[in-house]
Amino acid sequence: MLDTIMVWAQCLWTDFTQWWNQNSAVVPRDDYNPLLDVSGFLGILAFSVAVFTLASPKFKIRQATAIIPFQPLFFGTLQASAIMMMTVEAFIIFELKVPSFLNLNAINYIITAMFAFLILYWMKVCFIMPPRFTNLTAKHFFDQALHCILNGSKEEMLALAREITREAERLIYHASPTKIRKTDNKNPVKTSALQSHAYKILSLLSDTRFCDAVGKEIPTFPAIMVGVAVSLKRYDAPIQLMVRRTVIAMLKNKESALFVENEWLGQGFIGNTKPITRAVFENWHFLEKHELGLESPLDLDYPYARTWDVDTWRVYFGMAREYIHGLTSTGHSNWDARGIYYILKATGQAYEQLSDLKKCEDVFNQHNPIWHARVRTH
């Protein structure tokens, strides 16, 4: 049995050697005219390292959320091309025989075409047609949103906010409903991966670090999200907590858009139109229908509101005025709306706080605690 195998292997090797000698030849250097030589390949390698190192967070997010993520595709193609190119160069340098059915120029052309495809794909992903939120990219979008928010980098979170603004309609439309429905075990409510990822991404946006960064750098973000939710009639979209925390962040900053729009003079185009204030609060009565508006930006149950000054209260009541205007202009006024309760509660708190501030302005006023302290010391 062993002898038979040895004879068979020897015959097979003899046939292969004969075929190789008849159908292979050494390719001279003069016959090899590559479109992409080794120096060009090394230049592409150096350029790719610079691109991935210096790319802005926006382009990194777009590359990672593509249907085929660009970075693993690029490095996989780079590795395969390097092996093919080094093999071809070895055949030329060491004058090894090449099978007649292989054309080294054609192989080099294939390598060049692969890099050309990569460049076009990179341009398409980053500039021409950025990735959309679909079934094929939903998980990629969620992974990038989670990565950016967990890192807490301001630049990454702002880039994420801009990408989410671009895909706001798809995210809010596909987000799974948050309203709890009564179901039995036989017919449970099922949500697709697309709906689940959209809901999780919108829920991630309520991170306080994200809201602080957006409130300072992209104040239109909550206005856009509220406008999209209202236009799609998705009042149950999980954006209420994000809007509330972003408004809180803007109320803490006296240079924010809300202070500019609600200044006491109310002058200028921004002061007259109030684009962000009206976009959020004129439509808020729609969103507060869901879960009784428990995450309303009109709710003052947060500690620092106790130390607001007159300017901050002016901004708050400017927000309240736009809310009431939106509530009464629809033709279906609801005076039992949750926002009305928050505004009335805030009015009493503002009266008490501002009256205390007024009393403390005059150090000789008997209602001023400083006056009592001076009397006791004397």
Image: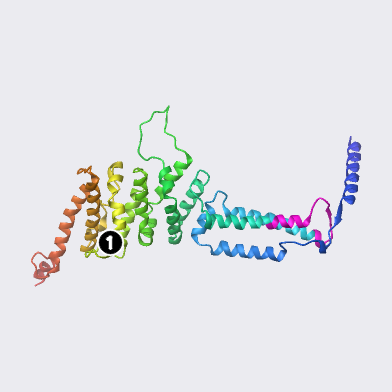
The picture places residue 227, in percent across and down from the top left corner, at 35, 50
Give the left or right position of residue 27, taking residue 355 as reference.
right
Q: Nearer the viewer, residue 204 or 275?
A: 275
Position above or below: 127 against 294:
below
Give the SS element for disc 1.
helix
Magenta residues (range): 91-112
Give the left or right position of residue 307, taking residue 250 as reference.
left
Amino acid type assigned to the residue bearing label 1 in the image:
Glu
Quarter of the image for residue 1 reads top right
Q: Nearer the viewer, residue 247 or 152?
A: 247
Q: Nearer the viewer, residue 318 or 147?
A: 318
Q: Give the number of marks.
A: 1
Position above or below: 339 against 52:
above
Q: Nearer the viewer, residue 2 or 124?
A: 124
- Image point 24% across, 61% down: which residue? 312
Quarter of the image for residue 123 reads bottom right
Give the left or right position of residue 5, taking residue 55 as reference.
right
Density class for disc 1 (Cα within 10 Å; few <14, some 14-19, many ≥20) is many
Residue 66 counted in the magenta span? no
The picture places residue 201, in percent across and down from the top left corner, at 43, 48
Quadrant of the frame with the C terminus: bottom left
Farthest residue in the top direction? 186
- Image point 43% across, 61% down: which residue? 154
The picture places residue 196, in percent across and down from the top left corner, at 45, 42
Residue 104 counted in the magenta span? yes
Residue labelled with disc 1: 261
The picture places residue 8, in percent across and down from the top left corner, at 89, 39
- The color scheme shown is rainbow
